[in-house]
Amino acid sequence: MLSNQTTDGRIDPGVVHDVLRNDRRRRVIQYLKQRLEPVSLRDLSERIAELETDESPPPRNIRQSVYNSLHQTHLPKLDEIGIIDYDKDRKTVALCERARDVDLYMEVITRFGITWSTYYRTVGVVGLVAVVLADTDLVAFVSIDSLLVATVFLFVLASSTAYQLWSRRWFYLRSFVSD
């Protein structure tokens, strides 16, 4: 059995990979990231069953299967690690601060299938090349001001950063809402 945390208090990467290996656990974390308040087990199992079957409402037997597996297996495991807070009596689930350790492994790829670092590096290099070409007054770029090119690429970088921060807003909002 792996230890749940490293010496610096973060969740051990082996434990993170074990958690993310299961589709239902990944979906639980993804769904809870969108919620600031605790979610009932019933609502959570309903949503995950919808995602698994692409039906709304999902068939009753699938809903029941998801409910049981979450209640008996997945939520207790995530609670033990400290990723979620699962109240078995009230049957409510909320994301914990330690979910950040897992989120680092979940959000590496953009929706376009490339990593954020590759995206930013590509935008930066293309922007630099465009500014240099605009500054050298080559025939194709003679009418374009290098300041305009730089401004456009800085806007693209700023917009991308704003999008990435917005998509991770639950990290920041949760710290304001928490006790």
Image (cartoon, rainbow, N blue to C red):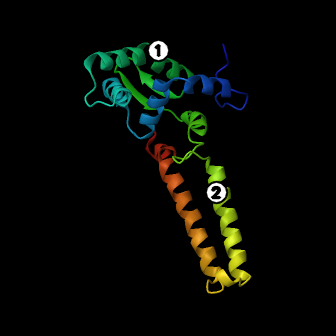
**In front here: 110 or 170?**
110
Q: Earlier in the sequence, mark 2 or mark 1?
A: 1
Q: Give the percent coordinates (x, y) of residue 13.
A: 67, 28
Q: In what element is the residue under mark 1?
A: helix
Residue 91 picture quarter: top left
Q: In what element is the residue under mark 2?
A: helix
Residue 73 numbered mark, or none: 1
* Residue name at image x 55 percent, y 59 percent: 160
The answer to whether residue 144 is above or below residue 106 is below
The answer to whether residue 128 is above or below residue 49 is below
Left or right: residue 17 versus residue 55 is right
Is residue 64 visible in the rendered image? The answer is: yes
Mark 1 neighbour density, 10 Å: few (under 14) some (14–19) many (20 or more): few
The total number of labels drawn is 2
Marks 2,1: beta carbons within 8 A:
no
* Residue name at image x 53 percent, y 48 percent: 112
Identify residue type, mark 2. Answer: Tyr
Mark 2 neighbour density, 10 Å: few (under 14) some (14–19) many (20 or more): some
Is residue 89 visible in the rendered image? The answer is: no
Residue at the front extreme, as displayed: 139
Instruction: Look at the image and tell me in which quarter the C terminus lies.
Output: top left
Residue 113 numbered mark, or none: none
Left or right: residue 119 versus residue 42 is right
* Residue name at image x 40 percent, y 27 percent: 93
Residue 39 picture quarter: top left
Residue 120 numbered mark, or none: 2
Residue 130 picture quarter: bottom right
Q: Give the percent coordinates (x, y) of residue 51.
A: 37, 31
